[in-house]
Image (cartoon, grey):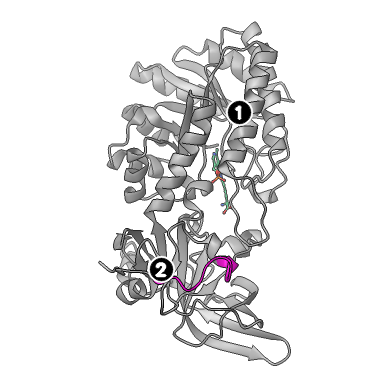
Amino acid sequence: MVGVTSYHITMSAKTLPALALFPLTTEVSKQSHLCIGGCDVVDVVTEFGTPLYLLDESTIRQRCREFKGEFGKRYPDTMVIYACKAFLNRALALIFKEEGLGLDVVSGGELSIAQSVDFPPDKVYFHGNNKTPQELNLALDWGVGKIVVDNFYELELLNKLARKKGITQDILLRLTPGVDPHTHQYTTTGTIETKFGFPLATGQAEEAVNQASSASNLNLLGFHFHLGSPVSEIQPYELAMELVLRFAREASRKFDFELSEFDIGGGFAVPYTLDSRVPTIAEYARALIGKLDSLISELELSRPRLIVEPGRAIVGQAGVALYKVGAIKEIAGIKKYVCVDGGMSDNIRPALYGAKYEALVANKVVRTTGKAVTIAGKLCESGDILVKDINLASVHAGDIIAVPVCGAYSIPMSSNYNALPRPAIVMLKEGGARLIRRRETYQDMMSLDLI
Ligand code: LLP
């Protein structure tokens, strides 16, 4: 356990704006150390080493409550399911269980983590565009709440597997509304050419409802769409809701089907940098529920259960990546590299999507020098850059770099590239630091190899 008993706040987001991106419990000590969850980050690093990922438990719980509260107070029959792909391990699954969220899982692996903490299976939604027969059997045997069917192959396969087991499985159909969410092309899923879902425009969505509503062992409860991630505009959601609800009304006239669940996916954005402007959870909820209410009355639909699937917006801000500075390379008049002991193996997002981050020096949270540096990783690729052209405090070997908003999609997309062991993860809460995943060792990495 590492803790600090009292705080002396010497800095605030006003003097150092980047602090606002860090977890909600972030403070700065008299020694100018970054403190999170009541813990001095420098002490946490002394105990657990670097690279290290910190998660602030209060921030995670606060975001769970905000989603439930903001959507629930406007539309009581809302279910918030956490999108596990943003990051799941057993400790996190327990937190989501305690907070009363459901889970969106996309693989037998995520499903097994949920199962291992006795997560209520009826609150689990199983997504994915190519679920294997083994994964579907695992889900059916566990009694997973809903399977979100993505394509005709799966529709037929699932019906066959359920029939063999004498089960009738509740399903949703994933529809592709043909709406561009204006995000990175690699994470755009709402447009017609995507690999996901039954397109509305081609008639395949209608054929899917036809087949699903007459399948012997499937019970069609409703529709799902997910436009992409992150989606920082409200309008694409509104348009997709309208297209899918109009389709639902037509489908219920033609087929033996009534919309009892309407799942609008995830994609809620978070600010990564000081210039990002994204809606708050309350703003998303206000706009989306307003639109939903007006569509329901205009189309004379009975009120379906609403499902939202936030991932990033729940864990993003809670996570901080910590690295130790080693080599510093200055190319006079051109560039100064500050090299750290992690990089694209623990956070591929800058290299893959051109994702931008802020950073500060955790053992020296003071005003910056005004000279931009580039924070580079230690992997053997020139593209292994974590943060380009950032103003830091003057930095030397041994200093600790803290990168905020690293709670989502860093660890779960990490790799052992260059045979780097994956970082440890520590959960911080009220002055306590608890290891929730130990650091990988060289032995761990070799343990799967056979000679
Ligand atoms: N629901 C479905 C069906 C999804 O595919 C996703 C994300 C979510 C919910 C949650 O989206 P979120 O609320 O976390 O934005 N690796 C990328 C993000 C890929 C998202 C994939 N699907 C990144 O690092 O930005």
Whether 77 is drawn above or below 380: the answer is: above
x, y percent for residue 338: 57, 82
Q: Is residue 445 left or right of residue 72?
A: left
Q: In which quadrant of this rendering is ligand 1 seen?
A: top right
**Quarter of the image with the N terminus in it:** bottom left
Q: Dot 1 corresponds to which residue?
A: 289
Name of the residue lying farthest toward the left: 1
x, y percent for residue 88: 40, 49
- Name which residue lies at 60% across and 65% down: 357
**Quarter of the image with the C terminus in it:** bottom left
In what element is the residue under mark 1? helix
x, y percent for residue 62: 43, 46
Whether 429 is drawn above or below 198: the answer is: below
- State the separation of the CA atoms marked 1 and 2: 37 Å
Give the mark nearest the N terminus, 1 or 2: 2
Q: Quadrant of residue 245?
A: top right
Q: Which residues are magenta?
A: 8-18
Q: Dot 2 corresponds to which residue?
A: 35
Residue 89 painted magenta: no
Residue 12 painted magenta: yes
Residue 161's disc is none
Q: Is residue 40 left or right of residue 242?
A: left
Whether 148 is drawn above or below 428: the answer is: above
- Name which residue lies at 48% across and 82% down: 325
Query: Mark 1 is on which residue type?
Result: Ile
Q: Quadrant of residue 151?
A: top right
